[in-house]
Image (tube, rainbow, N blue to C red):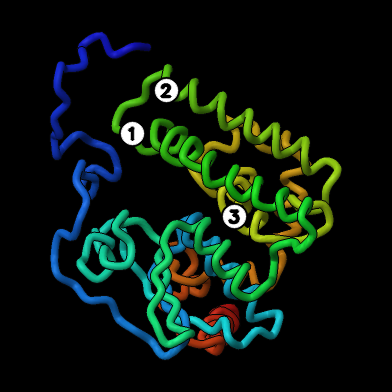
Amino acid sequence: MADAAYVPPEVWTWESENGGQFAGINRPTAGARFDQPLPVGKHPFQLYSMATPNGVKVTILFEELLALGIKEAEYDAFLIEIMAGEQFGSGFVGINPNSKIPALVDRSNGVEIPVFESGAILLYLAEKFNAFIPAEPARRAQCLSWLFWQVGSGPYLGGGFGNFYAYAPEKYQYPIDRFAMEVKRQLDMLNRHLANNTYVCADEYTIADMAIWPWYGALVEGKIYDAAQFLQVDSYQHIVRWSSHIGHRQAVQRGKMVNRTWGDPSGQLRNRHDASDFELRTQDKLEASE
């Protein structure tokens, strides 16, 4: 159904109260809105994030690196409350002018190196530690292709389908149909690929899996947008198998807890500064079940 009352103006202007879940924080301008320095912890890496699908990508990688015994990958993860607009503070904008989580500062070599955009952070860390990225050229190209596929496709799932189906103040058929069709095409593509592969890169678990899982794994498990029935996600059986397999990894379970502010309190770790923080969360859960 078209909105017969709306005719695009000759010059678009911003209206602050245009509805939708994110209307209170979205603006057509960049830059800091207020002064707020970022906290700094004791570890080589400082992560500023929230456990959205993009944020979870990076915390999963950190936990996977630590699970390999790479102690140099220790990190502090500070919660950035995006609905409160903390990503527009001067400190955060200073390391990420795009004002989106996650953002990382690498202090391991005595200088501060900021890295923003989740895909860039994954690639940066994988190359730095020579882990979760294939060395063989053809396999590496495959990994990077799927990593950038997710980075390019994610906005269709989140900003497109998720926005119009779940967050928009009014529902219109055209944008929902358009983005639902694209999301199902993406799911079909990924499902066909995983039919003959344990992971995205054959039998090798990589940053491509870590990038794709928080979005498409969550979708087929019915954890985002409340759209499982609408999209018939259980029909993508190979993605479902792959998603369950990854979701049972202990490092993944830890990673998705970091900077989380919703759901079961025992599954939330608002700020992470040490591996023992997870032990405290586990103990809380055990005590609650007694």
Q: Earlier in the sequence, mark 1 or mark 3?
A: 1
Query: Looking at numbered disc 3 in the image, what kind of residue is underneath it?
Result: Ala
Q: Quadrant of the C terminus?
A: bottom right
Disc 1 versus disc 2: nearer the observer: 2
Q: Which residue is mark 1?
A: 168
Q: Quadrant of residue 11?
A: top left
Q: Nearer the viewer, residue 57 or 104?
A: 104
Disc 2 versus disc 3: nearer the observer: 3
Q: Nearer the viewer, residue 234 or 34?
A: 34
**Disc 1 to disc 2, how far (Cα)?**
11 Å
Q: Dot 2: what SS?
A: helix
Q: Residue at x 59, y 73 (%)?
A: 128
Q: Dot 1: what SS?
A: loop
Query: Looking at numbered disc 1 in the image, what kind of residue is underneath it?
Result: Ala
Q: Residue at x 29, y 32 (%)?
A: 169
Q: Which residue is mark 3?
A: 211
Q: Is residue 177 above or below residue 277?
A: above
